[in-house]
Amino acid sequence: MTSEQYSLLVVDDDEQALRTIVNYLQAQHYITYQAVTGDEALALYRQHKPDVILCDLNVPYQGEGKLQQHIQALAESTPVVVLSETNEVSDVVEALRFGASDYLFKPIVDVTILGHAVKRSLEYGQLQRENETYKQQLEQANLELKNSLALLEQDQKAGRQVQFKMLPASPYQLGEYHFSHRIFPSLYLSGDFVEYISVGKEHCVFFIADVSGHGASSAFVTVLLKNLFARKRSDLLHKQDQSILSPLSMLALANSVIFDTGVGKHLTMCVGVIHIPSGELRYSNAGHLPQPILSTDGSSQFLAGQGMPVGLFDEPEFSEQLINLPDKFVLTLFSDGILEILPRTGLRAQEAFLLERLQQPQLSVEALAESLELQQIVEFPDDIAVLLISKGYH
């Protein structure tokens, strides 16, 4: 911006001083307006909105209030250079306090000092305008962000309701087997999920899954898992496809579905199939920690078996285990969020703590939560899913 594009308002009742200042500024190609009274100065300001005001605050003024108060109000948006014949420090401090961008002593002998003061004030004014623009942009961005966050929160809450409605009924009784679960989410949408479904008259299939990350994309993966198991149960009925009864097959199918989506998600998972008449449990663990805990009266142990996560590799390796469940037991499955809230450091110590607390089987999620003091936690650092399967206690 050249000097011809800047306008200055000079206010001084000293005609010689006014003429000296105006002549110099016009020689520097500034547009100038001049006033000898405060009333005239305010009228010119309202008419032309100059970029800088150079003002002697002692000029005559007949309007309402004090001229200094009006100038102080103008200084919030327009740089003001105060001109004064007094060199008292208190006057300088007072002028700067009410918002003056500079203070010059009269008479002005070296007009180049005036030129520097004007340039500094113009730069200051430009900075003020830029800051105001940035402030407005920031306020607008904050408003848009608040609106977006409010909308996202609404979507998240709606998504949570949908996701929780997909969870199985709790508690649930299937023959002599009792199922219950609970998810303690760290966010509105959880990456943890549990499922248990009857398959025909002789089998029950269950799984616990812990999807990486949080939010909508992780919840989307849980929807895929829910649909996969429902579809394969239907395939057994209509196509005699036995995949649903094989934890290995279900992990392989889940891996293919998640890997092919390209959403960049992977998960740990434990899948089990219970043969109801015999109490035989066939299960596979896909990198899930902690491992399932089998509890009987006075005893608890982790079930053996580990494998690779689901959705991380094109051809992961999984293994399958087969055990006979006791006539009286509780099988407890957690997602790994439980490890983050235990009063122990290190996986071995955390696992030992869990075995100790579950030596006496916890027959409900509420009792388990009380034993592990989950109810006292206000905000969970990670999602925690809990699945209990029991027999002989209810």
Image: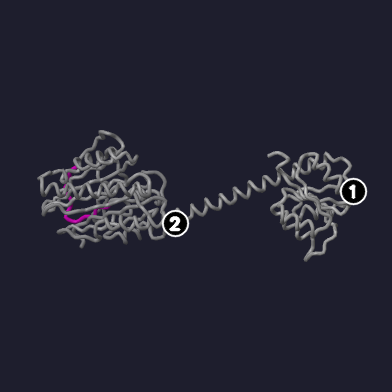
Q: CA distance from mark 1 to mark 2?
A: 63 Å
Note whether 373 is above or below 227 in the view shown. Answer: below
Element at label 1: helix
Pointer 2 local density, CA inside 10 Å: few below 14, some 14–19, many at least 20: few
The foreground one among 238 and 173 is 238
The foreground one among 81 and 293 is 81
Q: Is residue 230 magenta?
A: no
Q: Residue at x 81, y 39 (%)?
A: 27
| Residue 203 in the figure: left or right of residue 296 | left
Q: Which residue is labeled 2 in the image? A: 150
**Amino acid, disc 2:** Ala
Q: Residue at x 18, y 45 (%)?
A: 282
The foreground one among 108 and 204 is 108
The x, y position of residue 371, in whole percent, is: 35, 58
Lower sequence index among marks 1 and 2: 1
**Count of numbered marks:** 2
Q: How is the image coloured?
A: one colour
Pointer 1 local density, CA inside 10 Å: few below 14, some 14–19, many at least 20: few
Quarter holding residue 363: bottom left
Q: Main secondary structure of the magenta part?
A: strand
Chain part drawn in magenta: 321-332
Residue 16 image label: 1
Q: Residue at x 72, y 44 (%)?
A: 6
The x, y position of residue 106, in whole percent, is: 88, 48
